[in-house]
Amino acid sequence: MKIAISCDHNGIEKKQEIINNLKNRYEIIELGPKKYDINDDYPDFAFELGRLIRDKKIDFGLVLCGSGIGISIACNKVKNVRCAKVNTVKEAYLTRNDNDANVIAISSSMSKDKTKKVIDTFITTPFSNIERYIRRRDKINNYKEEK
């Protein structure tokens, strides 16, 4: 399984913790900055990861910023990305089971233990394939804005 992880300047340390936790179990693609620069722009890193999802080069994505909110909004601008801002293990479970999310966004300030549990739940929870969830997912994927 291929997992990409990206962040802005706020998530550099947390990104390394996550990579260290996952690298022995999954193929990890590290994106985003390697050093702190307050002038970086999280949309650039979100779009880069989103394109990998769109092009089916990775199975899942993990993104981090100060709150996780901005980077999740940016990720969702890329077609076929279903990124959820996740705060709890329950949300990580539900976003995979019900929504077939392929990216989660978390806050760089989430505790190390909680981060590990949230990410492990997200990665290991299968999509339920319930008809109504498939229909809803497909509506999102196929949406085209009317002009």
Image: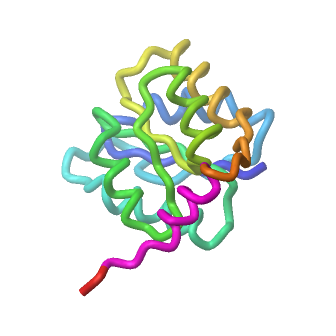
Q: Is residue 79 magenta?
A: no
Q: Is residue 75 visible?
A: yes
User: Over which residues does the magenta segment extend?
Assistant: 133-145
Residue 60: x percent and y percent? 63, 50
Q: Position of residue 147 (x, y in %)?
A: 24, 87
Q: Which residue occupies 59% across, 40% down? A: 98
48 up-or-down from 116: above or below: below
Say whether residue 67 is left or right of residue 53.
left
In screen coordinates, is 38 left or right of 34?
A: left
Residue located farthest toward the bottom when viewing the structure as drawn: 147
Task: Give the left or right position of residue 120, taking residue 12 as reference.
Answer: right
**Picture residue at 44% right of the left edge, 52% below the top:** 32
Say which residue appears at 60% left-offset and 29% top-offset.
93
Q: Residue furthest front?
A: 132
The image quadrant of residue 76 is bottom left
Relative to 59, 135 lies left or right: left
Judging depth in this view, the residue of 143 and 91 nearest the camera is 143
Nearest to the observer: residue 67 or residue 134: 134
Numbered label tally? 0
Q: Nearer the viewer, residue 131 or 83?
A: 131
Q: Residue 42 at x, y = what percent?
A: 31, 53
Whether residue 12 can be seen here: no
Above/below status of 35 relative to 45:
above
